[in-house]
Image (cartoon, helix red, strand yellow):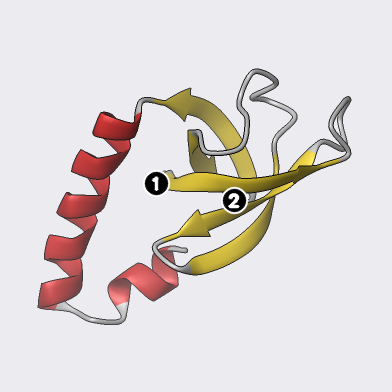
């Protein structure tokens, strides 16, 4: 089973091509993510991230709903969100 986690783009480096990367926040955890599959995504946009790659851009409302569901999992097991990101 694959799982993609929503995150907000904080900054973008190498703005073009296959090496397009950015800093993405996952509820305060910030990681460098490859953004080459989401060329239209910009700072402040939300993306779904799987194994270090943003695989699609999503609406902020959709991202918020996913995050709320993940927070419910975190209430069950506080370490689960950290292991997902």
In what element is the residue under mark 1?
loop
Which of 1/3 is in front?
Answer: 3
Establish if 67 lies above or below 59: below
Q: Residue at x 46, y 48 (%)?
A: 7
What's the mark number on residue 51? Answer: 2
Q: Residue at x 36, y 25 (%)?
A: 59
Label 1 to label 2: alpha-carbon separation: 9 Å
Decide if residue 83 is on the left or right side of residue 52.
Answer: left
In what element is the residue under mark 2?
loop
**Number of other residues with Cα within 10 Å of mark 1, as a class: few under 14, some 14 to 19, many 20 or more:** few
Q: Residue at x 23, y 81 (%)?
A: 78
Pointers 1 and 2 in contact (C-beta within 8 Å)? no
Decide if residue 4 is on the left or right side of residue 70.
Answer: right
Measured as percent of width and height from the top left, residue 68 is found at 17, 52
What residue does disc 1 label? 3
- Quadrant into which the N terminus falls: top left
Measured as percent of width and height from the top left, residue 63 is found at 31, 38
Measured as percent of width and height from the top left, residue 75 is found at 12, 74
Which quadrant holds residue 18?
top right
What's the mark number on residue 61? Answer: none
Q: Residue at x 39, y 63 (%)?
A: 27
**Labels 1 and 2: the sequence-earlier one:** 1
């Amino acid at each position: 089973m694959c799982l993609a986690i929503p995150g907000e783009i904080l900054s973008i480096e190498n703005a073009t091509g296959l090496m397009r990367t950015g800093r993405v926040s996952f509820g305060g955890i910030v990681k460098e993510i490859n953004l080459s599959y989401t060329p239209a995504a910009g700072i402040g946009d939300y993306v779904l991230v799987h194994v270090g790659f943003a695989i699609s851009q999503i609406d902020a409302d959709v991202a918020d709903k996913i995050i709320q569901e993940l927070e419910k999992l975190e209430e069950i097991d506080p370490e689960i969100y950290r292991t997902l990101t």
